[in-house]
Amino acid sequence: MDEQTARREIVRVGKLMYERSYVVSSDGNVSVRLGDDRVLATPTQVNKGRMTEEMLAITDLEGKALNDRRASSELAMHLLIYRERPEVRAVCHAHPPHGSAFAVAGLAIDQPILSEVILTLGCVPLAEYGTPSTDELTDAMRPLVKHHNALLMANHGAVAYGTDLWQAFDRLETLEHTAKIAILARALGGARDLPPGSVEKLIDIRERAGYLDERGRCQACGYLHETQVVCRTGDRPPAPRASANGSGKISLTREELIELLSQAARTGAAGDF
Ligand SMILES: [Zn+2]
């Protein structure tokens, strides 16, 4: 995306975020990666509903100003995501009420209740609280960024990112919509999870269709094999680490493990792992 188009689209996204109540006052921030080492970002202290194209700041990937505008104080969160995910070209951060309610309640958006969400967004984990605009916040986010396309930040809000600005915005919107549905379902007696086995099928479809790659296998906890990251999946069990050596340890294929975890979830024995 060239700079002029990026300026225009960031202003459009800012207006949408404000009109849809994802931000109020000078909340939230949006950025687009212009080249390998330049970022176009919303300025500090500006209402996103009244922002204009010439207000936008340009920085390098370390946050150093490259024009005479001051970027948002929360730019560090965007730069972390660009560094961790080279394919990401845009980031949207906001405080959408339903998603932020999850973040304030200390909850991730990780229940398998909507098939479309598993296909297009995946699970949204909750990063521990960190003071905005400090290393505390980026340290809390860092282990989660690689495996997810949107995060909640405890007692703060939400951030979503993608290969272009509209994908980042759509993911933010899906996050908010999912949180709203989950809250409404709770008022009706509680959301019911998708039937056993269906999550694995959806993950298979989304990977074959290219919606999300293997790094996003959160509902099946597959990515835990490769990292020490703990996915905050509520009462779902942490995955046992497969091992090939003899000493009394078990060795499982991914399929076997998924089946085991699904059985555990079905029988309610999740806490036993
Ligand atoms: Zn914020």
Image (cartoon, rainbow, N blue to C red):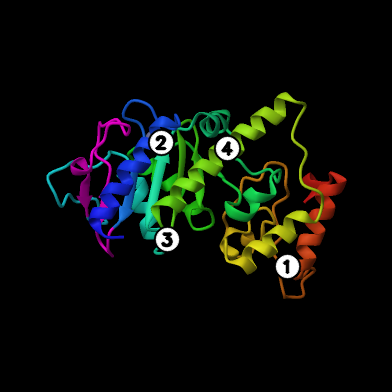
250 or 128: nearer the viewer = 128
Residue at 57% of width from left, 54% of height from top? 229
How many neighbours does mark 2 have within 10 angstroms: few (below 14), some (14-19), or many (20 or more)? many
Nearer the camera: disc 3 or disc 1: 3
The mark that comes first in sequence, 3 or 4, is 3
Q: Marks 3 and 4: CB-CB under 8 Å?
A: no
Badge 1 density bin: few <14, some 14–19, many ≥20, Cα 10 Å? some
The crowding category of the residue bearing disc 3, from other C-alpha atoms within 10 Å (few below 14, some 14 to 19, many at least 20), is some
Task: Decide if residue 83 is in sight here.
Answer: yes
Identity, as a three-letter code, of the amino acid under mark 4: His
Relative horizontal placement of residue 154, taking residue 51 as reference (left or right)? right
Whole-number angstrom distance, CA of label 4 to CA of label 2: 13 Å
Q: Give the range drawn in magenta.
A: 34-59
Which label sits in the foreground, 1 or 4?
Answer: 4
The reply to whether discs 3 and 2 touch (Cβ–Cβ < 8 Å) is no
The residue under label 2 is 17
Q: Nearer the viewer, residue 183 or 3?
A: 3
Q: Which amino acid does label 2 sit on?
A: Met
Q: Name the residue under label 3.
A: 85
- Which mark is nearer the camera, 1 or 2? 2
- Which comes sooner in the sequence, label 1 or label 2? 2
Along the line of sight, the residue nearer the viewer: 16 or 146: 16
Can you give x and y, in whole percent of width and height, for residue 61 in the image? Answer: 27, 56
